[in-house]
Image (cartoon, rainbow, N blue to C red):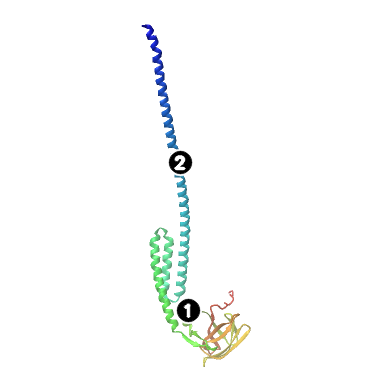
Amino acid sequence: MSDEVVEEAPRTYSGALLAAIAIALLVGIGGLIWSYTLNSKLSSQQQELADAKAQNANMAARLRETDERLNVATDELKTSLGLTQKQLDSRAQELTQREARQEQASAKLASAQKETAQQVTAVSSAVTDVKTDVGGVKTDVAKTQSDLATAVTQLTSMRGDLNGHSSLIARNADELELLKHKGDRNYYEFTLVKGQKKPVGTVSLELKKADGKKSRYTLVVYSDDKQYEKKDRNLNEPLQFYSGKDPQLFEIVVNSVSAKNTVTGYLSTPKGAPAPPATGR
């Protein structure tokens, strides 16, 4: 009986060891599989993270580029709006010097602009006010232009003394202002006293004779080292001559002759003619 017990003990120990080894192998294999799976998932997530970072960087670059384009467009728009406003103010001021209503409209526009600059937080409301005032300015400017065109058509057209050229002339200061606003030529007003040679524009004039009773006069024009005598002329008669390196037609109109040997009038020159040199006061 004791011999049989001794022989069975080693068999029981060997079976338990094999079972433990088998379990250890299974655990090891499972661990390897789990580690491989985990490593694969980690690699995939790292790749996805890298892709996301790349996309974020790309989107950030595009956003910066968009911001830069927006800033450039905004600057261009501001510049364009600034120039347009400046030109409108200049034109309104030029055309409305003699119109009381136009001066009032320009004052309203200046007030609206000042309010816009001071109240930055109320930009939308201020811009609306400016647009309203600008609309009023445009309406008044259009009316002024229409009135000016009507007045210009009423100016006298007279034939000059040179080759039959005819042109509009001004018979008084108001009509001369209309011609100046018309903008076709340059105008230089003058007063001449008998015996005095006086520069007017780019030429010089000298009154030789003045007859206040008959409203006639005689004067000499000095231009380009030449002189032209306009003898025994009438009031508001265009006296014409050519002047300049590239000869252009100049005109003289005398509007009044006094008994004190004095005449007043104006010299008219083409827009492209040379301007007289500036003189300091």
The image shows residue 199, relative to residue 125, as above or below, that is: below
Q: Position of residue 240 (x, y in %)?
A: 55, 86
Label 2's element? helix
Q: Position of residue 213 (x, y in %)?
A: 51, 93
The image shows residue 146, relative to residue 18, as above or below, that is: below
- Residue at 40% x, 74% y: name it: 140
Q: Which mark is residue 34?
A: none
Q: Mark 1 points at which residue?
A: 182
Kindly give the residue lying farthest to the top in the view shown.
Answer: 1
Q: Name the residue under label 2.
A: 47
Question: Looking at the image, is mark 1 or mark 2 earlier in the sequence?
Answer: 2
Cα separation between marks 1 and 2: 77 Å
Front residue of 47 and 125: 47
- Residue at 45% x, 82% y: name it: 152
Label 1's element? helix
* Residue 211 can be seen in this image: no
* Residue 158 can be seen in this image: yes
The image shows residue 168, relative to residue 140, as above or below, that is: below
Tell me the kind of residue under disc 2: Gln
Q: Are marks 1 and 2 in contact (CB under 8 Å)?
A: no
Front residue of 52 and 40: 40
Rendered-image quadrant of the N terminus: top left
